Image: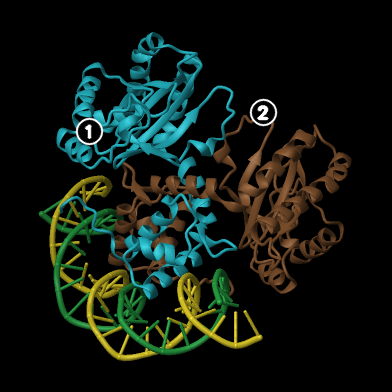
Chain colours: A cyan, B brown, C green, D yellow
DNA sequence: AATTGTGTTCCGCATAGTGGAATTTGTGTT
DNA sequence: AACACAAATTCCACTATGCGGAACACAATT
């Protein structure tokens, strides 16, 4: 019961190891991993061997580990066959056509958002630099929008497990500040990221959710402040909300045209 | 041996299920999976539950399964921190600057190649449509190049487990045809895909391998036949080989500048 | 109402994972 | 070189973990 952090037996352990290696900023060798996960030597060693065997992990020349190619293979499939993303795609393009700025689609996963898709103008940046990337929900447009769509109980629970961190001087770093912000979003229907995650970058977002709100996500239009000012962003608010609504409509139609 | 791949205990079983779902072209519901995997109901059900719990799988409205977002999160990390890709990147760009055509980087994984990176001109196609994608090695430029770098014993073993399939009328569909082709590649240092995988698309490739040849990969320059003819492709051969050599150099330097 | 086809739960049993300790391999030091 | 020290790998008795047959719910069809 609790929160569900149980860790699903053997698979859970394996994933924990994978995650440890994935999240580390520095390369990890065997003993490094051993220090970070609470497991006996022998056990850990076998787990890692299995992960390597399955292609989820591989070893570098210096015995440090890196994530395996199999993950790329799977992710490629996961992306192209993802139902939600597929439905949203045309709407993202439409939003981009009108605004001319970068459009993001992200879903809430625990306390952070995972970017599922993006459409950008003259893409200079590589796609992988965004798609699949996760960012803290509390300081991003889509993140805050998505949270606003959560049922109260769930919202409180999530907020309480956030590890706040200041990225810029406008970042919201307290639960109260975030809570009132969420209320505003619920009222207006739009979330704004006022350079809270990255200096000089701001965005408008709107929430997307399934009927039961088990699934919450968001879309956003992002731009540098020197090209798009706050007034313009506010003006796009309704447009973004409409796109979000259109996506929810499409979902409802494709999933349960019952009657 | 052969290709049965023992299946690493519990983890292996889980991956088998994941793969089954990933490779299916149609959405699978519980019983569909049950039919394709040789497992008792109860067992399968728990395995799937675990996969869902870990975010590796998720359910659609109609109870069919799709790959989970966690895979995207991991893949994003896998890609950006991949050592080989990082080293190769500047060389791919260089190759693209000179030729103006699409450049691919792929590694051999069993009997198919997984594309690790690509650099293309006016990319109209989305990146995910290629990166992470896997294609049969026997009918692609990088695939054949990579195979040519394998030690003989390993090569024979891999070839014997290929499931040939005709994609176009130039596709090589026999082990003998492929074997002699591999010999040619070893001699000349270049592999060609003469519209073997996709009509109207051909490419030049060159092999990349680690010293011990445990790791083999390839790079290629791909183009439509109406824009680039075979002569031009042949002319690029040495250039592609040089790039491959440069990448191998960089790898050796970064990994073992011993002595 | 009966039937067939789904998805889910239960529980005794055996297998697959566990983890402490010993062995081998590798790195740096005098 | 020979050493010492640490890191990586193998071993094996133990038991917790996943296994899987069968019983249970719940829709959809007839």
Q: Quadrant of residue A157?
A: top left
Toward the viewer: A180 or B158? A180
Q: Distance between the residues labelled 2 and 1?
A: 40 Å
Regarding residue B200, the answer to whether it shows in the image is no
- Asked if A85 appears above or below A52 in the picture, the reply is above
Indicate left or right for B258 with D20 as reference.
right
Quadrant where the C terminus of chain B is found in the figure: bottom right
Q: Mark 1 points at which residue?
A: A150
Q: Who's the residue at 79% across and 35% down the image?
A: B98
Where in the figure is residue A42, as x and y percent of width and height? 39, 75
Toward the viewer: B34 or A111? A111
Where in the figure is residue A247, as x and y percent of width and height? 36, 26
Regarding residue B42, the answer to whether it shows in the image is yes
Toward the viewer: B208 or B183? B208
The local secondary structure at tag 1 comes to: loop
Toward the viewer: A213 or A87? A213
Q: Who's the residue at 22% across and 39% down the image?
A: A158
Where in the figure is residue B114, as x and y percent of width and height? 60, 52
């Amino acid at each position: 019961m609790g929160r569900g952090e149980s860790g699903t037996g053997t698979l859970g352990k394996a994933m924990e190891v994978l995650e440890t290696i994935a999240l580390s900023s520095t390369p990890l060798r065997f003993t490094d991993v051993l220090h970070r996960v609470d497991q006996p030597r022998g056990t850990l060693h076998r787990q890692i061997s299995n992960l390597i065997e399955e292609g989820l992990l591989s070893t570098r020349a210096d015995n440090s580990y890196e994530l395996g190619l199999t993950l790329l293979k799977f992710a490629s499939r996961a992306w192209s066959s993802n139902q939600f993303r597929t439905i949203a795609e045309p709407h993202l393009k439409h939003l981009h056509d009108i605004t001319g700025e970068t459009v993001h689609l992200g879903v809430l996963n625990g306390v952070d958002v995972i970017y599922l898709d993006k459409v950008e103008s003259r893409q200079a940046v590589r796609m992988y630099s965004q798609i699949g990337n996760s960012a803290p929900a509390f300081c991003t447009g889509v993140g805050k929008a998505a949270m606003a769509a959560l049922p109260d109980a769930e919202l409180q629970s999530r907020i309480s497990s956030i590890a706040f961190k200041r990225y810029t001087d406008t970042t919201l770093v307290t639960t109260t500040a975030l809570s009132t912000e969420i209320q505003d979003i619920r009222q207006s229907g739009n979330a704004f990221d006022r350079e809270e995650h990255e200096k000089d970058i701001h965005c408008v977002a709107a929430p997307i959710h399934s009927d039961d709100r088990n699934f919450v996500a968001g879309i956003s239009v992002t731009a540098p402040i020197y090209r798009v000012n706050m007034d313009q962003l506010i003006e796009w608010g309704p447009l973004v909300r409409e796109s979000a609504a259109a996506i929810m409509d499409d979902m409802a139609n494709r999933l349960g045209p019952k009657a």
